[in-house]
Image: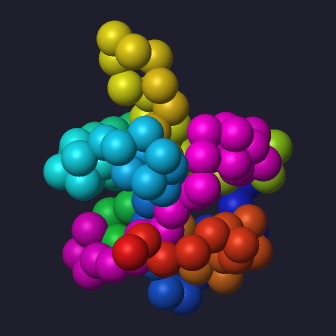
Amino acid sequence: MAVPGAGSPGRLVQYVVVRSDLVHALSWPLGAVITQACHAATAAIHLHYGDPDTQRYLAELDSMHKAPDEAALSGLSDRLSQAGVAHKLWVEQPENIPTCLALKPCPKEAVQPLLRKFKLFR
């Protein structure tokens, strides 16, 4: 991963970006949406467990954001990939629906510009 500032002593965050349209437009139960976020966060931690920032994050913890819809979520995943930011796009199966994504824990200042437009989950 080529995230600037990786390994720096700054505040670590793990952003979990959830599609808000799952609840508001598609009428998914809130519990099902929360489950998607948990799956994505767990998968991102698992995939990057050996990373020093992940280990430091696990010794601390915090933060969560939402995306308005599937297009915004997929676009964010593409931008994160282009920027070299490690993350996991969670796709619910067998429906094959991208529902949320979770970043590998990393320094907040390195990823916040990519996530600035997303609102806190409510």
Q: Say left or right for 68 vs 75.
A: left
User: Of residues 19 and 1, which is closer to you in this image?
Assistant: 19
Number of numbered markers: 0
Q: Position of residue 111 (x, y in %)?
A: 67, 69
Outermost residue, top side: 94
At which x and y percent is residue 13?
A: 46, 74
Q: Is residue 106 left or right of residue 110?
A: left
40 horizontally vs 100: left or right:
left
Image quarter for residue 30?
bottom left
> For the magenta stretch, what is the residue range?
58-81
| Observer able to see residue 47 | yes
Q: Furthest-left residue in view?
A: 31
Picture residue at 44% right of the left edge, 54% below the top: 24
Please determine whether, in this image, residue 35 is positioned above or below residue 119: above
User: Coloring scheme of the render?
Assistant: rainbow
The x and y percentages for residue 84 are 73, 48
Residue 14 lies in what quarter of the image?
bottom left
Front in this rendered view, residue 65 or 21: 21
- Residue 63 locus on image (x, y percent): 40, 76
49 shown above or below 7: above
Residue located at (58% from left, 57% from top):
67
Asked if the magenta segment contains residue 30, the reply would be: no
Residue at the image position 70 percent from the left and 61 percent from the top? 3
Residue 52 in view in this figure = no
* In magenta segment, residue 61: yes
Which image quarter is the C terminus in? bottom left
